[in-house]
Every structure is written in C-alpha cells, then in structure tokens.
Image (tube, rainbow, N blue to C red):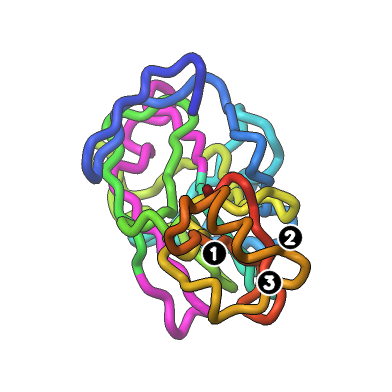
Amino acid sequence: MATESSEGEEEGKITGGNKLLVIEDDLREMGKKAAWSVSSCKPGNGVSSLRDDNLDTYWQSDGAQPHLVNIQFQKKVKLQLVVLYVDFKLDESYTPSKISIRAGDGFHNLKEIKTMELVKPTGWVYLSLSGNDPRETFVNTFMLQIAVLSNHLNGRDTHVRQIKVYGPRLDQKYPVSYCLASIDPRQLEIGDHILDDVLNRRAGGNRARVCTKHLATKIQFIPQCW
C-alpha cells in the first residue's frame, strides 16, 4: 500500500510501519460519518486526538485493559480498511502489541473479525477487514470496535495517535468478486442485449459470466467481469 515502507506482515502479525499514508483511489475515509467514543482517557488526551490529523497528539487510555475505541454509524456502511498511527520509538510501553477488531449492530452483538499482533510498530499500520473468502472484500456494519488487548513491555495504558477507517467509493466499478459465475442467461431477461451475440462474442458459446447490479429483470454487463 505504501510506496515507502518498513512494514512487514505475516499471518496475524505486523512488524514496523509505514512512514507515509497512501490509500488506493477506490477507497474513501468514512470516520467523519461516525460517532467516536473510548472506554477511558487521560484528561487532555481524549478521543478527539485520534481524529485531529496531528501525529504529535495521541489518545491515552486511563483504566483496565482492554482499551476500546468505538466507531458507530447511523446506518450500515461498508468498511474495508482500518489504519492506525502508532509510534513505538516515542511511546514504548504505551504502544499496542495486540489488537482485536470487532463489528456488529451495536455493543450487544459485536463479533471479532480480526486480531493482529504488532511488533514495535512506528508509523501507519494497515489492517484489512477482508475475509478469507475473496468475495468478502469488506464488512457491512453499524459499528466497529478496536480493542487494544495488550501493550509492549507489559504496559497498562495505551497510546494511539491516529485512526482512519476506509470503505469502497460509491461510484467505483464492481470488482470481479461480484461477478456471478455459471449463470444461464436464458433464465434472465437482459433487455436490449442480444443473447446470442453475448454468448458468441463474450462467452465463447458457453454460459456467460454475468455481472449484475440487481438480481432482477435487468442485467447490466460490465466488461471488467469478462
């Protein structure tokens, strides 16, 4: 993701961080649409420090672990990426070492979707919300919770300097993962498209791979799906 990076990632673990925040064009920052809260904070180091675009400020918890950041939306949103700025060089034992990300409709039904171990991170750390299934490119949720489960050097309270959350842009083209394979087009009405022409030119006479915006009587073919 970043052009200049010292971040290394393996299963469930990230080492280091990225000096620059580099985000793909098909993503947009969603945090401004949410209500943010934290489980505890030291006076002067509250939740606003997570969203002020200032890497010199930080949220500092003031209580027992886990330390929680709650991100709540008024309506369901699609979220694909969480990016944290943490700094082991400056914060040492306040730096998170294990993070859990949970999603749900509210506090009553949050489910863990990812845990990640951070190894001496300094910089932007990217946490993808994609599932193991290639079709699961985002989570569709009312609420996201970021839980700091432990800190480096057995520290009690934590420092997090920035958090950003990203989802797919509304105007982006549908990815291949949205293509519905092996659908017989004869079972669908495709409006002005000529079925024989579609089959012969785009699917080689076989069953077409149809990419739809709506599973209804109108089917829109999107070239990227072929």
Q: Residue 57, position in %: x, y?
A: 61, 34
Q: Secondary structure at mark 1?
A: strand
Q: Does residue 89 sit above or below 224 in this rendering?
A: above
Three-letter amino acid code at disc 1? Asn
Pair 2/3: label in front = 3
Three-letter amino acid code at disc 3? Ile
Q: How many C-alpha atoms fall within 10 Å of the one at disc 3: few (<14), some, or many (≥20)?
A: some
- The answer to whether mark 2 and mark 3 are in CB contact below 8 A is no
Residue extending furthest right? Answer: 192
Q: Which residue is mark 3?
A: 190
Q: Quadrant of residue 14?
A: top left
Query: Would residue 16 be visible to someone looking at this image?
Result: yes
Q: Which residue is mark 2?
A: 33
Does the magenta run of residues contain 102? yes
Three-letter amino acid code at disc 2? Lys
Q: Which residue is mark 1?
A: 70
- Left or right of 153: which side holds 209? right
Residue extending furthest top? Answer: 4
In the image shown, does 188 or 85 lie closer to the viewer? 188
Identify the residue at horizontal 38%, vertical 48% (top origin). Answer: 157
Residue segment shown in magenta = 83-111
- Left or right of 93: which side holds 181? right
Q: Does residue 204 sit above or below 112 in this rendering?
A: above
- The answer to whether mark 2 and mark 1 are in CB contact below 8 A is no
Spatial CA span between label 2 and label 1:
13 Å
Q: Residue 22, position in %: x, y?
A: 58, 27
Q: Secondary structure at mark 2?
A: helix
